[in-house]
Amino acid sequence: MAILLSDAGLHKHLLPLTFTRPLGAMRPGILTIADAWWRMTELPVGYRTEPYLRSKFPEITGEVVREVHGGLLPTPELVSAVLDLAPGQVLVHEGRALAFCETGMGKASEVDWEQPPLFLTQKPFTGEVVRFVQPGHLFQHCGKAIVNDFALLTDGRRSAPLSALNTVIGDPHLIFLEEGAVVEASVLNTTNGPIYIGKGAEVMEGCLVRGPFALGDHAQLKMGAKIYGPSAFGPECRVGGEVNNSVLFGWSNKGHDGFLGNSVLGEWCNLGADTNSSNLKNTYGEVKAWSYVHEAFVGTGLQFCGLIMGDHGKSGINTMFNTGTVVGVAANVFGAGFPPKHVPSFAWGGEDGFDTHELDKAFATARRMMERRHVPLTLNDEEILRHVFHATADQRS
């Protein structure tokens, strides 16, 4: 048996975050969606995604394959319902497919997810469904993802000891430190949700943290950081300043003062010192953001929405991002004033205009940054970035 996480026709809806990964490889909480499925089912997990991503995120075969919408949070109730599916059944919620059970690889397509095929027997699901189908959903549902992952990772386990030099507000049992985690002289508030500190991670002195909050393995909160939950920072992140309800997938840095709110950063991003992002319009109105589906700015349905940045995005010192700014993969933004609200992938510049961030220079920067975390830039990584570079050429022109 196996779990196959499908992009379900939504890959373009979650750009620029999915330029470099399938939906199931996103990290809305402590774990990626795929990691959570693997831990909860103990089954092999694969992906049905764009052809150019398959070398890094392969499909998977099995005698019986349960193909699941990759943008779903795997709650215990949902996972149980998926595992209970028999071949020829489709799990349905409010008329939409959540998962199929088929022999072999199956033949699910985009239309199947919106209108489950009649030749499959529908099995209704009445529990809560948490979907990540647009970038803003990652910070909107971050709290639910952290609570779900926290329960999965800590059940029946004992936290590493928390130093007595810290101040705890709320239930101390909702704080969990993995082996080697260090937290000193900080204020931890669990009134609104749990706080998880990953293996070898460090919360430096003077930090103020409100849950739900997750700090990934070997990540750091810099001295005096102010973190409002729900927020989740993945492995090896470096975070300082003020952050509110934001998600960093991993290996990304916001290491200095400046505000980041209601935002999502992919992997290997770096925000220069005193970078600030607006997350609320002066009119208090709905935020519009760039849609890769419509190739235009469209309403997000959100009053609070900050920065969405694809993998390897960078900003220079004192960069100012307007409400609802979308920055593509390997874009480098710098200079005075506000850059445009849509910065294409591999763009280099700011308010005064952009040049192309050429592939060889982008690869060189990526290698230098990744080597600092002892992670190689693989041939698969290069091929994915090369595909994104050519696929987004029209946006830069």
Image: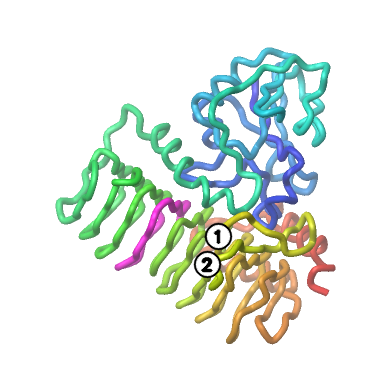
Cα–Cα gap, marks 1 and 2: 6 Å
Locate the N terminus by quadrant: top right
Pinpoint residue 322: horizontal percent, then vertical percent: 58, 73
User: Is 375 positioned to the left or the right of 274 in the image?
Assistant: right
Residue at point 65%, 67% (across, down)? 327
Q: Considering only vertical position in the picture, is 121 above or below 300?
A: above
Q: Which residues are magenta?
A: 218-236
Q: Considering only vertical position in the picture, is 71 above or below 246?
A: above
Per the image, the residue denoted by label 2 is 280
Amino acid carrying mark 2 in the image: Leu
Amino acid carrying mark 1 in the image: Gln
- Considering every residue shown, the one lying at the far left of the view is 164
Q: Considering only vertical position in the picture, is 205 above or below 149?
A: below
Which dot marks residue 303?
1
User: Is 134 positioned to the left or the right of 149 in the image?
Assistant: right
Verify whether residue 220 appears in magenta.
yes
